């Protein structure tokens, strides 16, 4: 049990549901890094830079977040090489050649192509929006900001829907096994 320190009145607050969260649609965006943190990899095999990007344009998506991880150090040479190449592309898109502190990247606008990635192989995580390409000012090939006319079907991101909405009783309970009952279900 955890005491709140005061009595909370839920009826005194707005509880209107705002709708389902949807990934950013495929398109060209202006983004800026607004948060970053360096953390050890979960398996202890290296260092990851976690970055929060915020959409600057197009205006209808301004303020939305897009998250990226960069493998800066990894025991797997391929993972490290890919992570460092992606991070170098971010730096070049921002116009920075050397970085000692990730905060040096904050609040500098860059342009990137965002698209829907793939769901996790184990089906645990749905496909999510990710950076597919960085655009570099020094190449002069800066496309206009905008949303692609064709988008992937919505079902492409619904691989967890069936599992999340599966309210069937566990097999042990259905077979008459001893399943624990929830305390709120007792009267």
Image (tube, rainbow, N blue to C red):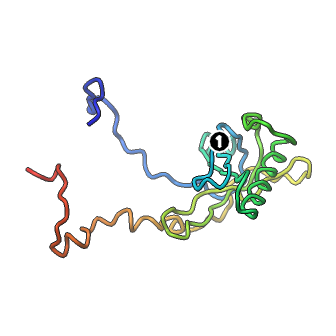
Q: 90 or 177: which is nearer to us? A: 177
Q: Please name whichever residue, 12 or 86, is drawn nearer the observer in this view of the structure.
A: 86
Position of the N terminus by quadrant: top left
Identify whether 92 is placed above or below 35.
below
Query: Callout 1 environment at 10 Å: few (<14), some (14 to 19), or many (20+)?
Result: many
Residue 147: % across, % down: 67, 55
Residue beneath the point at 76% across and 40% down: 109
Q: Residue furthest left?
A: 187
Residue wearing tag 1:
54
Query: Does residue 14 appear to the left or right of 89 in the view shown?
Result: left
Residue lying at 60% horizontally and 45% vertically, measured from the top left? 65
**Vertical relation: 9 (above or below) 181:** above
Q: Residue at x 56, y 63 (%)?
A: 127
Q: Secondary structure at mark 1?
A: strand
Q: Is residue 162 left or right of residue 81?
A: left
Q: Provide residue 28's location: percent of width, then percent of height.
A: 72, 53
Residue 17 appears at what percent x and percent y?
Answer: 38, 45
Is 172 located above or below residue 40 in the figure? Answer: below
Number of numbered markers:
1
Residue 73 location, x and y as percent? 73, 52
Give the image quarter of residue 128: bottom right
Q: In which image quadrant can residue 103 be found?
A: top right
Q: Is residue 176 above or below residue 101?
A: below
In front of the other: 70 or 138: 70
């Amino acid at each position: 049990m955890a005491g709140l320190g005061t009595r909370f009145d839920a009826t005194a607050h707005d509880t209107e549901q705002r709708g389902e969260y949807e990934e950013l649609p495929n398109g060209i965006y202006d983004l800026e890094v607004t948060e970053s943190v360096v953390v050890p990899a979960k398996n202890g095999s290296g260092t990851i830079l976690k970055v929060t990007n915020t959409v600057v344009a197009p205006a209808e998506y301004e303020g939305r977040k897009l998250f990226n991880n960069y493998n800066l150090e990894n025991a797997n040479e391929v993972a490290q090489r890919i992570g460092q190449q992606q991070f170098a592309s971010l730096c070049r898109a921002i116009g920075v050649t050397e970085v000692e502190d990730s905060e040096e990247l904050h609040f500098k606008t860059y342009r990137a192509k965002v698209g829907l990635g793939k769901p996790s192989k184990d089906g645990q995580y749905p496909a999510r929006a990710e950076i597919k390409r960085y655009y570099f000012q020094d190449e002069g090939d800066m496309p206009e900001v905008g949303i692609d006319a064709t988008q992937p079907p919505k079902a492409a991101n619904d691989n967890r829907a069936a599992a999340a909405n599966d309210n069937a009783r566990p097999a042990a309970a259905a077979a008459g096994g001893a399943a624990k009952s929830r305390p709120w279900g007792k009267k």
